Amino acid sequence: MRFDKRHLLGIEHLKPHEITEILDLADQYVDLNRRQVKHSDALAGLTQINMFFENSTRTQASFEIAGKRLGADVMNMAMQASSIKKGETLIDTALTLNAMHPDLLVVRHPHSGAVDLLAQKVNCAVLNAGDGTHEHPTQALLDALTIRRAKGRLHRLSIAICGDIAHSRVARSNIMLLGKMENRIRLIGPPTLMPAGIADFGVEVFDDMREGLKDVDVVMMLRLQKERMDGGFIPSSREYYHRFGLDADKLSHAKADAIIMHPGPMNRGVEIDGTLADDINRSVIQEQVEMGVAVRMAAMDLLARNLRGGKKEGIYV
Ligand code: NCD
């Protein structure tokens, strides 16, 4: 069995052995990234285009560095300045780029499903860098790698995902991945930020942090996605922090060696106490960023192998 996908659109389509294959290769790229000379030719001669229709700091930088370290020709499209502003549709933009023969297209879009649609129209491999509230597969994979390295395994762990679950593609992808790897998942947040019917996904739901965090191995905090809220989901940031913000008192209910995660960007003093976020004995937030580059290198490497028909030589070399 090997990774034979054409695109990386979501965790939904991945089998446990494919997740493990990506993480195993990513472990090797972590070692490469820690060397002084960080270069491989896995993507040499290939063209990678990053199309971000939504703001991004770490994800876009991470995909760009990943492509460059693997020797790809990487282009970042400035979507704010693109013809989309002149009324061109997403599909027309995709077809135009497709005619330039890219090999890897990395796409972030505010609408759920937009990246899947685009993948149907192009000949290259497409990676979803976040579509609306739907999926963010490389984030879930980098979170999984971070957990696996910190805890020594990725199964039979008790993991709390806390905060704005309803608007979070990070939560959706993580619930699927961590569920496939047979972990116990607890979701903690106000009922207004909990998607209806979520308990059917085999998760436990709490609206009290102290209760929900009891004896967990991993505490994953989420950003309040205010840009996706169109009404009064929370009374005030202060009230939210009081009930759902992670501080030392709430954390004391988790296991003594529980790790703290956050995908970034963080609202310090809203979702999480700034001192805890910076506590190198508990927080793995910087490791998550490091793992992000390695996971994206692994994912693009595996997709590129499939472009070449599984052979090193081919029309692309
Ligand atoms: C996340 C995203 O864009 O979905 N950020 C990220 O990719 N690191 C989470 C967020 O924006 O809160």
Image: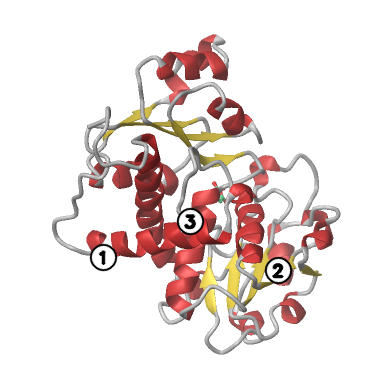
Which amino acid type corresponds to the residue marked 3 in the rendered image? Met
Element at badge 3?
A: loop
Number of other residues with Cα within 10 Å of mark 2, as a class: few under 14, some 14 to 19, many 20 or more: many
Element at badge 2?
A: helix
Number of other residues with Cα within 10 Å of mark 3, as a class: few under 14, some 14 to 19, many 20 or more: few
- Colour convention: secondary structure
> Looking at the picture, does residue 45 appear above or below residue 241?
above
Instruction: Give the mark nearest the N terminus, 1 or 3.
Output: 3
Instruction: Give the mark nearest the N terminus, 2 or 3.
Output: 3
Residue 235 appears in the picture as rendered:
no
Residue depicted at 61% across the width and 46% down the height: 135
Residue depicted at 63% across the width and 84% down the height: 254
On residue 31, the disc is 1
Does mark 2's beta carbon lie closer than 8 Å to ligand 1? no
Residue 232 appears in the picture as rendered:
yes
Which amino acid type corresponds to the residue marked 1 in the rendered image? Asp
Tally of numbered tags = 3
Question: Who is closer to the viewer here, 65 or 144?
Answer: 144
Residue 131, position in %: x, y?
60, 38
Residue 38, position in %: x, y?
19, 54
- Report how far apart the C-alphas of labels 1 and 2 lie in the structure: 37 Å
- Report how far apart the C-alphas of labels 1 and 3 lie in the structure: 25 Å
On residue 244, the disc is 2
Q: Are marks 1 and 2 in contact (CB under 8 Å)?
A: no
Name the residue furthest bottom.
256
Number of other residues with Cα within 10 Å of mark 1, as a class: few under 14, some 14 to 19, many 20 or more: few
Identify the residue position indicated by label 3 in the image: 1
